[in-house]
Amino acid sequence: METAFTPIESLAGGVLIGLAAVCLMLLRGRILGATGILAGVLLPASRYDWTWRVMMLAGMFAGPWVYFVIAGQLPAINVTASTPVLAVGGVLVGIGVTLGSGCTSGHGVCGLARLSPRSFAATGTFMLTTGLTVYVIRHILGA
């Protein structure tokens, strides 16, 4: 398995995520945590709360199409996992988000910027778990 190194695209994506996080904090006083935003769409506290969350999700879905307009093609995505594996992965992510009280965008981008001790612990746990998972899958299981 080869991992593509895309520094320009990664930097651009990081800048856009950071800009979105700053704008959301400035304009709404809210932290950009993608799973929290999705949860608020599914179980809204109010109509006002629901509207900005839907707009954030719409922006996330529009991103690849903006890329298409600029680059003339959609990014190549090759998903080799089966649908059941993706479903199990989604459930595990949901459990992790619940146990960690947030996701990588909420803790890793916004929490670290606020110097939150809980976010430092959560982000360290995310990174360690990710590294161990990649190591096991690539070097022990040979996938």
Image: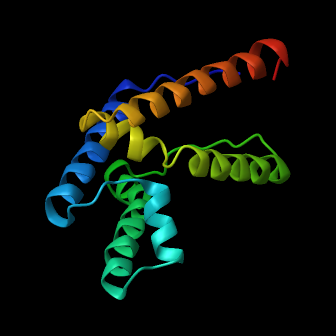
Q: Is residue 117 above or below residue 54?
A: above
**Point 37% across, 52% down: residue:** 67
Which of the 4 image quarters holds residue 44?
Answer: bottom left
**Point 36% across, 87% down: residue:** 47
Give the percent coordinates (x, y) of residue 27.
15, 64
Of residue 13 and residue 128, the one placed in the foreground of this image is 128
Residue most extreme to the front = 117
**Point 35% across, 66% down: residue:** 56
Give the percent coordinates (x, y) of residue 71.
36, 48
Q: Is residue 143 above or below residue 75?
A: above
Which of the 4 image quarters holds residue 142?
Answer: top right
Indicate left or right for 73 with 95 as reference: left
Quarter of the image where the C terminus is located: top right
Of residue 84 and residue 104, the one placed in the foreground of this image is 104
Which of the 4 image quarters holds residue 138?
Answer: top right
Quarter of the image where the N terminus is located: top right
